Image: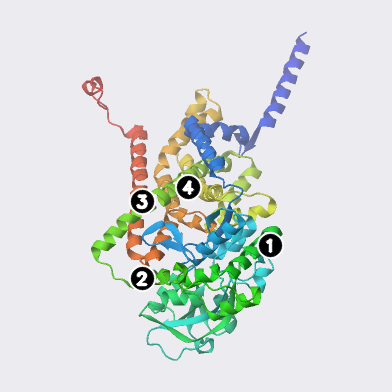
Amino acid sequence: MEPRRLENQKANRTRQKAKGRHFLFFKEGKEKVSSALLIFEICLLPFDFSFFFVLLVSSWFIFSPSLTVAADDLRWGADSEGGAPFVFSKPDNPRELIGFEVDLVNALGRELNRRPTFVQNQWDGLIPGLQRGNYHIAMNGLEITPERQRVINFTIPYYATVEQLAVRAGTTGINSLADLKGKVAGALKFSLAHTLLEKAGGIEVRTYDSQVSCLDDLIFGRLDAALMELPVAVYYVKPNPKLQFAGEPFEPVLYGIGVRQQDQALLAQLNDALRTLMKSGELRGIYEKWNIWNKDTEKLFVELVGAPQSTPATSPANSTQAYEDFTKVITNKPTWGERLRRYWSYLPFLLFQGAPMTLLISILGMIVAMAVGLVLALTNLYGPRPLVWLSRSYIEVIRGTPLLIQLYLIFYGLPSVGIKLTPLVAAVVGLGLNYAAYEAENYRAGIQSIPRGQMEAALSLGMTRAQSLRHVIVPQALRLVIPPVTNDFIALFKDSSIVSVITMVELTKVYGQLATAYYDYIGVGILTAAIYFLLGLPFVKLARYAEKRLATDQRTPVPAKRRWFGVK
């Protein structure tokens, strides 16, 4: 019996070793716990149930059906920061959008019996956003070009204009593109004007996200000339005494409404509605209201629908009051009292529209960054060799590539493989995954800074390696990394301004919309910067409080009398 008992014990030990080899591996002579079990167990410690509650509430908010748009709405994409006369914020009521294209889309919605719903999007991202399905149509002074016609469909042209050069007042010798050889010229990014400057050759071309920024650089002497469509020049160059037209207009331009190639039915409906508006004279009335009616557009209407009906001379639409109101705004020199009252009126718009979205994106993004970063750090330190290599590769790739490119890939690239995220989810995921790489290095440094004796003492008490990490090492490391993590949160909070490129309207985007309304970047910019500072300050104070409370080794003994009265 004794030999059989010894054989059974030997067989049991063999099975235990095989089982151990299945869950454990060895690295540099030290026992390492399987990363799947170890990492999952440790990740529960710093976040506990409140973390999962926050994720649950956040997920409900992100995916809530109440945030979706009604199916019968006509979603149209444009950039309200682009300025007049297309789409811009009303100066005395920034929550309201005005412009000739706002009037046009309202008329189209009435003809199609669909309610227009505005979707904010960067101008240079209008076509990718349309292809992605963020909106049904793109309409924001979108020029009909062969390059764009290869990827989207255009309606019949709804407006015809020309290109116009602008220079500083008093400048001579610049009347055409040929005169710009060896000089610096600016244009709206990816616009037809940008293409014309590039094709001209010999010109140093600088591109801008908005026409207003381009003209600002022209005034400040950073540019020798700026090229733009005539409606923009009429609104921003003609009334400005510091600027003037240069030479005669050239290069015909046609504006069209962008539609996805698969939306043939919508394309036909829009074309019919445009022809109806042209025949009735309503579209001409809109253009006259904004002082952009011209002979080129009149000729276009004749070609498309014959002789359109004229608007009555007594019609309010026949007045150029909208243009006159705008020129008064940008040429008026307000007093300091008027400026302060204007900035005060901006506060609700900044605080209740821009600031909450910035806070939501930043907090959710940091939660993702902390969770993923901790997993990456533990994998890097205690995972099997393949996972170690993957975690290190992820960290280096993410830290070595721009956040803007990562956001573009997540928002515009993933739909091509069937993964379509909402703008809010894409913003949170993009910021979270980017900052997770930095948090992983913070956690790794914190864990490695804990003396080796802490682990040995925990193991000597009978704890497993996973228990030692969870209950001894990681809590101490988290206390040590509070300062760098706080610093990263403040950096993420400011970097949230980048998400405006994926249709998110946060604090910085609201600032741009308000600044273009009154052509005032300094005052509104200072106000926005102050809001950023005040929003971030409580988190800094909270982090310092947490760091002090967790610094148990630095606490001073509390006398018995103070403990008796509850004073700590």
Ranked by sequence position, the earlier of labels 2 and 4 is 2
Q: Which of 259 and 564 lies nearest the eye of the viewer?
A: 259
Ranked by sequence position, the earlier of labels 3 and 1 is 1
* Residue ID at (58%, 60%): 108
* Residue ID at (43%, 61%): 89
Residues tagged 4 and 1 counted as in contact (Cβ below 8 A) = no
According to the image, label 3 marks what residue? 348
Which numbered mark, 1 or 2, is in the foreground of this view?
Answer: 1
Q: CA distance from mark 3 to mark 1?
A: 41 Å
Q: Where in the figure is residue 217, as x and y percent of width and height?
A: 41, 75
* Residue ID at (64%, 73%): 305
Ranked by sequence position, the earlier of labels 4 and 1 is 1
Q: Where in the figure is residue 231, as x and y percent of width and height?
A: 49, 75
Ranked by sequence position, the earlier of labels 4 and 3 is 3
Q: CA distance from mark 2 to mark 4?
A: 34 Å
The circle on residue 268 is: 1
Give the residue type at disc 1: Ala
Seen in the image, is 411 located left or right of residue 477? right
Q: Which of 334 and 543 lies nearest the eye of the viewer?
A: 334
Which numbered mark, 4 or 3, is in the foreground of this view?
Answer: 3
Task: Name the secondary structure under disc 1.
Answer: helix
Q: CA distance from mark 1 to mark 2?
A: 39 Å
557 shown above or below 244: above
Is residue 262 something one can see in this rendering? no
Task: Name the secondary structure under disc 4.
Answer: helix
Residues tagged 4 and 3 counted as in contact (Cβ below 8 A) = no
Q: Quadrant of residue 258?
A: bottom right
According to the image, label 4 marks what residue? 361
Ranked by sequence position, the earlier of labels 1 and 2 is 1
Which numbered mark, 3 or 1, is in the foreground of this view?
Answer: 1
According to the image, label 2 marks what residue? 330
